Image (cartoon, rainbow, N blue to C red):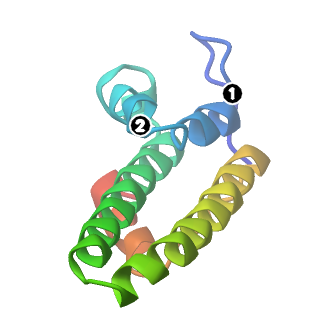
Amino acid sequence: MPEETPQTGLSDNAAGALAYVTIIPAIIFLIVAPYNTNSYVRFHSWQSIFLGVAAFAIDIVLTVIPIVGWILIPIFGLGFLVLWIIVLLKALKGERFKLPVIGNLAEKQAGS
């Protein structure tokens, strides 16, 4: 289980979960010490960024496809919402939950 980060009072679990609340905290955690040296927080920050990029890319592709794509947008949106809630809760519990493909990329970027 990740330990408390001594200088900020924000636990690693909370920082990992906060990384999933938009892309901004994830980027901040990758830049600001002591979070940028913590592999747990870096992993969740990178996974959050990759998940956001994947959601955006799929949304763009489905928007371009007439009728069928427009019908699938809400379904994929709901799927990404459920996935986002799952990874946020897993990070809050202190688990390093890896998504397929995205999790491997995040792990490589985090150096863990």
Front in this rendered view, residue 104 or 67: 67
The image shows residue 77 at horizontal and vertical percentages of 52, 66
**Identity of the amino acid at label 2?**
Ala
The image shows residue 23 at horizontal and vertical percentages of 39, 39
Residue at 70% x, 62% y is 86
Q: Is residue 82 left or right of residue 75?
A: right
Query: Which of label 1 and label 2 is nearer to you?
Result: 2
Q: Residue furthest front?
A: 67
Quadrant (top left, top right, bottom left, bottom right) of the C terminus:
bottom left
The image quadrant that residue 92 belongs to is: top right
Front in this rendered view, residue 96 or 18: 18
The image shows residue 95 at horizontal and vertical percentages of 70, 58
Vertically, is 70 above or below 21? below
CA distance separating discs 1 and 2 = 15 Å
Image disc number at residue 11 = 1
Image disc number at residue 26 = 2
